[in-house]
Image (cartoon, helix red, strand yellow):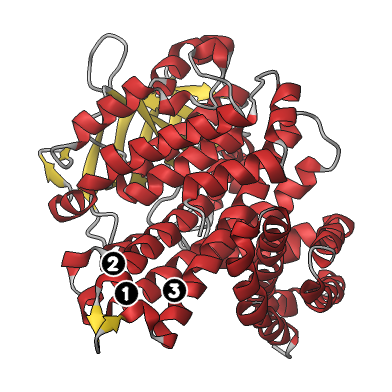
Amino acid sequence: MMNAAGTLSFALAKLHDLPALSERLGTPLAAEDVSAILEEASRFAEERIAPGRLKADRAGCVLENGRVRTPAHYAGLLAEWREAGWQGVAAPVEHGGQGLPHAIWAAVFELASSADMAFALMPMLTAGAVDLLAHHATPDQAARFLPPLISSAWNGTMCLTEPQAGSDLSAIRTRAVPDGNGYRISGQKIFITWGENDIAENTLHLVLARLPDAPAGSRGISLFACPKILPDGRRNGLRCGGIEEKPGIHASPTCTMLFDEAEAELVGEVNRGLPAMFAMMNAARLAVGVEGVGQCARATVLAEAYAAERVQGGQPIASYPDVARMLGEMRAITQAARLLALDCAVSLDRARAGEAGAETRLALLTPIVKAWCTDRGVEVASLGIQVHGGAGYVEETGAAQIWRDARIAPIYEGTNGIQAMDLLARKLPRELPAFLALLREAEQAHPALEEPARALAQAAGELAAAPAAQAGAAAMPFLDAAGCVLGGAWLARAAAADPAFEAEATFFLRRLLPRAKARLAEAMAPA
């Protein structure tokens, strides 16, 4: 299997012609530039981030007097990340970024997340904050907030949900009261990734809250920027009330944040906070899908190394048929998921370049990538444990950590069931022709894809007009089938362009693509 950096470079340069797209975006990159950036990102990830992954997991985070202490080596690692300039890869040039295509950032983030998912969550949320502010902040806010975020001197957070709200953000109760100069935020936010930490100079919380005269429901939500440290050096009226004990991502503090008349300023329009926040949420959904790819990749690397070295019955276990099957499945899924996620990331760049249809493609692919790639991350990590046998179920090998870390990704940034409903009940009725065009592309990628792509197209037409209950019951298996078909198509295209992908493509099309038929039968069965 071609290594991660090699696959990413090949796909961006050869399958997506990123050099030509980058020219249209005003940041020209030759294929050699793409390769050089990703080889350096891979080196940084493997030499600087990955060696501390197990240590960080074991150390975890500690809450002391409202302050969170993270693993000891993270401060130095963040300083190296900052010095190398990785945070600003795709950020606006006018505020200190490099302005490269988002697809380059997605590739860099996959490598970082694969090296240590807990650490990479901080840059992920910060990148989302940068994207939100670049589109919705005033010029003055952008000038003050973007440079420290882009340099990673500050980190950014998404303060969305509350104990009573869950995924229903219309139920939030956090209040914002005008005070003459700005606003005062009071309330409680939960599950705030990197909400409190000891390694960034400051933390900028992007908070959803209600004004006193706001209408009920989601139409009455506004968005506010609320820094931990105020410009005059005072600590703002907010603190961490607790950190969650979690199965995985131990080194990423998941915080309950308490706001007590914290000083804040409005971002965007009054009562239009949720649409603004979707800029950050959609970027995060793509990034979480990429996290799933990263965990696939790390699990595969560990399993391959163990299977090559572990001798049973006088030969490495990699030579036994069932182990070879599991390794083949891990490799094929990893590559298919990686290529599918890149299609989504490149679609974002094409949309920014004004390409017709790119915005719709991005909207259709985002829930598929978020859900399919994260489910595969858990699945491949579980296979990795199985390859290790008993050694995989103890912490020493690191295989179990990948599984524990990966398990959160199908839950956060909108559960995978929510993503499936977004695709089937919301987007397909509006964008059915564009989805069918995606399937026609897949059908042409390889003869093995013709039947499943056509069956999926027929199901899409039926389900787009189905009653809500039927669509709800069908949504998750339908999305799973769609991810399998579209991911398989990208793997087939890669194999047609480079024989290095032939083994993974053949395995996927012969052994894994039939699962799409089974999932589609499940989707179309009576609820």
- Tag 2 or tag 3, which sits nearer the N-term? 3
Please determine whether, in this image, residue 132 is positioned above or below residue 153.
below
- Secondary structure category for the residue under label 2: helix
Residue 378 picture quarter: bottom left
Tag 1–tag 2 contact (CB < 8 Å): yes
Tag 1–tag 3 contact (CB < 8 Å): no
- Secondary structure category for the residue under label 1: helix
In the image, is 415 to the left or to the right of 239? right
Q: Position of residue 327 (x, y in %)?
A: 44, 73
Residue 295 seen in render: yes
Residue plotted at (22% across, 81% down): 390
Q: Amino acid at mark 1?
A: Ile
Residue at the far right in the pictured view: 433
Disc 2 designates what residue? 399
Q: Amino acid at mark 3?
A: Leu
Please determine whether, in this image, residue 139 is positioned above or below residue 243.
above
Residue 158 picture quarter: top left
Q: Position of residue 372 (x, y in %)?
A: 58, 64
Q: CA distance from mark 1 to mark 3?
A: 11 Å
Disc 3 designates what residue? 327
In the image, is 143 to the left or to the right of 196? right
Please determine whether, in this image, residue 304 is positioned above or below residue 467.
above
Disc 1 designates what residue? 385
Q: CA distance from mark 1 to mark 2?
A: 6 Å
In the image, is 310 to the left or to the right of 300? left
In the image, is 226 to the left or to the right of 242? right
